[in-house]
């Protein structure tokens, strides 16, 4: 089992030639572990304005599983190639593409389709990644970090001394939120369900306050909050919102409980500003410059020592069933990554220990 980004390494073939492209495909909606199949398709040359990217590492996120499960049938066409987040190396560039260049590490963004060993993608929809970042760090530098950064910048109004509540605080995105809150010299209050998560978080962030709270329980022990970030929804989200002071802000961005917030929440809390954040509209409507600036801010922080999300394990694309079994394991300690079929896995001595 790997436990850090340094311990999940891959090698890719940049000269795919006529080799088939391997992808995880859903032809019906349902649980990912049941409906996904590894299919092999004829390769396609990158056309004008396109690049071929050899995938080095891909993440498995809740948004992937929700989409495969059929939550968005109106915008998901079957057969569906899964995967919203991955990093790779530009293997070939089509006519008219001056940037990115062959050999650059990039993040393809904008749609699903990345659980493959190679993809052909519009050059305008790939983000350059500094080569100093590992493939695993690069693969994890999109959905969670960019969401956290945009919420902090656009909705939270956080400054020195701001008291910020964060539920589901041991998740990858919450760790980014905690890091950004600390960067702003604000005060994070981290809420977790499991007692064992307290020690994990306090090891990563020794100065923060970590509290346990059962899903849907009263949060009377939580101090009054200036800002709250809700990844759960349902009763847990509503309990968090009730701790926000008049004039404060409540940002809802996830539905881990599967239960929406009550529709009259805003009426119940008239003095609290309630915002709903989704990354997809920003990706679709922001300018290329806005995207580059956001990703640059994320990558600069990673290079300066911001903690990467912990990695639980890495699995070859051909062994995707094992990846989903590990994803569901109660003792999982971080992200589960998929590596292309040409990848190999290495463990450093530190990771193995």
Image (spheres, grey):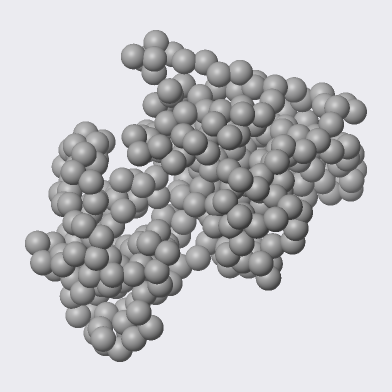
Across and down, in percent, residue 331 comes to 34, 34
Q: Is residue 84 visible?
A: yes
In percent of width and height, residue 266 lies at: 32, 84
The residue nearer to you, when weighing 80 against 36, is 36
Instruction: Please give the name of the residue rendered at 40% of the width and 50% of the height, measured from the top-left corner.
Output: 173
Q: Position of residue 3 (x, y in %)?
A: 39, 26
Q: Residue at x 54, y 31 (%)?
A: 322
As drawn, 74 above or below 43: below
Q: Is residue 63 left or right of 254 when viewed as pictured?
A: right
Q: Is residue 68 left or right of residue 227?
A: right
**Rendered location of residue 244, percent (x, y):** 21, 72
- Identify the residue at the far front of this view: 34
The residue shown at (24%, 51%) is: 193
Q: Which one is nearer the viewer's eye here, 57 or 33?
A: 33
Residue at the farthest top position: 349
Q: Quadrant of the C terminus?
A: top left
């Amino acid at each position: 089992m790997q436990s850090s980004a340094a311990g999940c390494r891959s090698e890719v073939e940049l000269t795919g030639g006529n080799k088939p492209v391997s992808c995880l495909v859903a032809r019906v909606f349902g649980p990912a572990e049941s409906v996904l199949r590894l299919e092999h398709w004829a390769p396609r040359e990158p056309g004008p304005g396109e690049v071929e990217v050899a995938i080095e590492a891909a993440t498995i996120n809740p948004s992937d599983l929700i989409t495969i499960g059929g939550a968005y049938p109106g915008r998901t066409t079957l057969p569906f190639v899964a995967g919203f987040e991955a990093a790779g190396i530009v293997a070939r560039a089509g006519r008219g593409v001056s940037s990115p260049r062959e050999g650059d590490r990039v993040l393809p963004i904008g749609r699903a389709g990345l659980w493959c060993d190679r993809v052909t993608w519009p050059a305008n929809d790939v983000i350059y990644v500094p080569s100093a970042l590992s493939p695993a760090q690069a693969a994890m530098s999109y959905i969670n970090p960019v969401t956290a950064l945009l919420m902090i910048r656009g909705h939270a109004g956080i400054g020195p001394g701001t008291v910020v509540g964060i539920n589901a605080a041991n998740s990858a995105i919450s760790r980014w939120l905690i890091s950004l809150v600390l960067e702003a010299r604000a005060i994070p209050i981290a809420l977790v369900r499991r007692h064992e998560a307290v020690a994990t978080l306090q090891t990563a962030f020794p100065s923060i306050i970590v509290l346990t709270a059962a899903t849907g329980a009263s949060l009377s022990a939580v101090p009054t909050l200036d800002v709250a970030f809700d990844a759960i929804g349902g009763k847990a989200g509503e309990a968090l919102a009730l701790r926000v002071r008049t004039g404060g802000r409540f940002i809802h961005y996830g539905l881990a409980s599967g239960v929406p917030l009550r529709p009259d929440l805003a009426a119940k809390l008239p003095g609290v500003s309630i915002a709903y954040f989704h990354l997809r509209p920003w990706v679709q409507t922001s300018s290329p410059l806005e995207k580059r600036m956001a990703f640059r801010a994320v990558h600069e922080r990673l290079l300066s020592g911001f903690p990467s999300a912990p990695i639980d394990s890495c699995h070859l694309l051909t062994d995707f069933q094992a990846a989903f079994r590990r994803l569901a394991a109660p003792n999982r300690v971080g992200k589960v990554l998929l590596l292309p079929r040409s990848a190999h896995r290495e463990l450093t001595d530190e990771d193995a220990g």
